[in-house]
Image: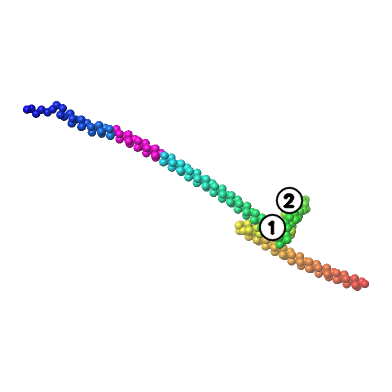
Amino acid sequence: MSHRKPIYEDEPSAVPAEAPQSQLQERDTQQPAFSTKTLQRASSTSTADMLSQQVRQVRLFLYAHTLAAENSFNDALASVFRAESRFTNTIASLAPPRESGERLLPGSIYVLVSAMAGSIISRNRGIFLRATTPLAVGTVAAWTLLPVTMQNVSDLVFEYEKKIPGVAEQHVRIRTAAEESWYTAKAHSAHARGLLESKIGQGREKLEEWVRKGN
């Protein structure tokens, strides 16, 4: 009895040995395709995120600059309104109160006529007199006819001059000197008037005495 090995005994074992190699090849061929799809999805997702982030930054940039422009416009408009209100209140504060009895309409016309009269008087004089005489006559007429208004104007000018110390001090010195000169001239005028009245009285008494002696 012979113990021969069958001729096809090793062939069934050869078929299972080839199966792992084919499976590995299939896995190797499937793995790159899967990784490529994953990379494509990841790249598309990152591009969309970057685009949305840039759009968000642009929107925030536009919103911030629009808000800044609106705030600047509102601030400028508010400053204009405040300046207009201050100007209106300043002009209104120059008007005399009702209890003073001072009226601007006739008084201002009289002041203008006085300044024109000063210009007519000095028309044949030099340039300096032609420039200063109407101003001086108008100023005197304004202080005479509109004293309350001129005092308000003077106080307002002095308030602005306080912002420049040198000008304010010079104004105070000039004003003090002018007031002292005015009071001195007024006192001398009163003294001269008293002397004149006394001389006139003495002359009248002498004249009456002479008339009585003649009779």
Along the line of sight, the residue nearer the viewer: 7 or 137: 7
Give the residues in magenta.
29-47
Residue at screen point 43% across, 40% down: 51
Q: Quadrant of the N terminus?
A: top left
Q: Of the residues tagged 2 and 1, which is closer to the observer?
A: 1
The residue pinned by badge 2 equals 127
Farthest residue to the left: give it: 1
Mark 2: few, some, or many residues within 10 Å (few <14, many ≥20)? few
Residue in view at x 70 percent, y 64 percent? 180
Q: Is residue 153 visible?
A: no
| In this picture, residue 65 sits left or right of residue 142 | left
Residue 95 numbered mark, or none: 1
Which percent across, then down, holds residue 164? 61, 57
Is 31 part of what is drawn in magenta? Answer: yes
Residue 134, percent from left and from top = 74, 53
Residue 60 among those drawn in magenta: no
Vertical arrangement, residue 57 with respect to residue 12, above or below: below
